[in-house]
Image: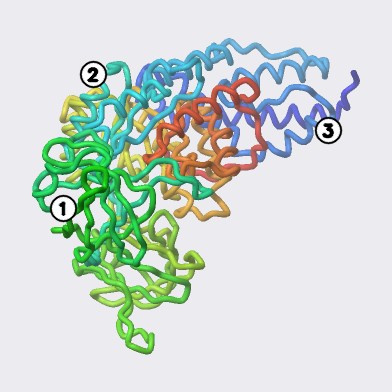
Amino acid sequence: MHYPEKKLQVISGVIDSVIDKILEFESKYKVQLDNVHPNYTQSARNLIHYLALRSFDISDLQEKLDEIGLPISPESKNSIYHRLLNFKTILNSLLNIDPPAHEDIHLTNKEAKIIQHRNSQVIFGTIKNKRETAIMITQPTEAATDKNFVESLLKLGMDCARINCAHDDEIVWKQIINNIKEIENECKIAMDLAGLKIRTGKITPGAKVIHIRPKRNMLGKLVAPARVWLAPKGIEPPKGKQVDAVITVNEKWINKSEKGSTIVFMDARGKKRKIIIDEKENNGIWGLCNKSAFVTIETVLNVFFEKNTTFEVHSVHDLEPLEAIIFLSNGDLLRLDKEPISGNPAVLDDDGNIVEIAHISSTSPEFLNNVQVGDPIFFDDGKIGGTVIETHPKYLIIEITNAKKKGGKLRADKGINLPSSKIDFRGLTDKDKKDLKFIAKNADIVNFSFVNNKEDVAALLEELKKLNANLGIVLKIETSEAFRNLPSILLKAMENYPIGVMIARGDLAIETGWKNFAIIQEEIIQICDAAHLPDIWATQVLENLTKKGIPTRAEITDAAMAQRATCVMLNKGPYLEQTVKMLDQILCKMQRIQNKKGALLPQLEFNENL
């Protein structure tokens, strides 16, 4: 086949320029390369080669290769220098040029794959079901008390268990870990440092109401009745049992009730509802309810005994307040307090006019001082968005610009993102340092939240050194600053072995902007591939299936694309077991037809101060 000589010469010149840049980068970043762990020597070098390659617009070169039909592309990321030299040899042969001698030993593609597999295995262990992609699962609180639930997750395909230190406490964490290790000691335990996560403060509790909610799918079909625990005050539901609602009642009729006894009542909306007694246990009774119901302190319970031939009338003795919610719509104003004032919905007069706007506080008010008028602000992973229109010493005024048509629900302890505001914080919080002591003794991996630069990594490494801890580190990339600094973050982290990267897509999408996120997600995967590091595809994977029992088409596609990563992370929800099963099937099927593929590589903008 004839190839145009002039085009071959142009391509050869580009390859020469890339090779020269590689040698320049190796010299420029020699100190960083010398400091990495011995297991990362070749990987760090290949990462530097990748950065040298990406300092050019390689997409133009790819187009030239495609134009002349040359069937080899130089953009393979896991053994860049070796591929470039081989490619140069082919070009020299086509141009009848004697190739120069290259005496250096370079990492081959086969050797790179072996390194990648080793780095993945040391983080996630042996992956189940002959999958190439691991499954990490965020553990709900019930995993501390329900060993059967934990065993089910492990059997269905959980390779790594994630515990988020932002929730629960050391007692619950330890119980979860013990349950997992008793069933499958090889299962890896990863624990997230909470990091600097600005959250909404407390909201004044609502009315004392219990909402009994049976499980239904997206079509409204009953999947399982709600399990209601009825017992005298102080008698808690048995540990490890599913409980959807708790009603405190008089103990006089508990002993009279048998399986099949019935409680009939009119709920707070005037709808007739029925609870059928299923079993008695520990001075309480379990009831099943097939329909949604709202129970208040005024609800009258008609209790039928002995196959409904006799009955007694009883009352509800005490209830917990309903979860507090602030509803926000586009155009609404919200006051974000810097003082710990309990939040409240807007106050309206008799004519529906707003007397006082809704307000809520922040758990980290000190970081609101640098917020400027015009800055965007997001709540609850971007579900509600707004713009700061006023700043005051004690509060901010926000105009809601992005909420659901019927109104967004703002709750306590939800994340606040300020993507354009300067948040001046570095390193580890006091809570992180305290939690790290527990993690060092009980976990295999520490997930480092909100890392932004190599100085943050240095702070973590120093703390691990003080604790004499031998932990794997997963770097959670969730800010635009972290993405810009990713090469330097990785090189610093590679002083530790092993490490990995989590693409924390929830915060990352908000911080970097929706229009940029898809590209940034791909760039992180490419960089991890070049560094031979395992990456985790995280946030909202099969979320609708996990929470509502049926997936959307879009999230099935997302889960299929996740097969390209080393690991996929699932969050908790009532249909988690069903989700694990489906994800396992998707990943196993996708790996038959999909592997990591080449992509167009325009110039990558990154912080060169590694």
Height in image: 428 above or below 83? below
Q: Which residue is mark 1?
A: 248
Label whose residue precedes the other's in the sequence (2 or 1) = 2
Label whose residue precedes the other's in the sequence (2 or 3) = 3
Q: Which residue is mark 2?
A: 182
How many discs appear?
3
The type of residue carrying mark 2 is Glu
Q: How much space separates mark 2 and mark 3, taking CA atoms?
A: 60 Å
Quick check: can you spot residue 166? no
Classed neighbour count for the residue bearing mark 2: other residues with Cα under 10 Å, few (<14), some (14–19), many (≥20):
few
State the SS at label 3: helix
Height in image: 171 above or below 155? below
In the image, is 222 to the left or to the right of 140? right
Q: How much space separates mark 1 and mark 3, taking CA atoms?
A: 76 Å
Location of residue 32 in the rendering, given as x and y in whole percent from the top left corner: 39, 30
Quarter of the figure that contains the C terminus = top left
Height in image: 379 above or below 525? below
Q: Nearer the viewer, residue 357 or 255?
A: 255
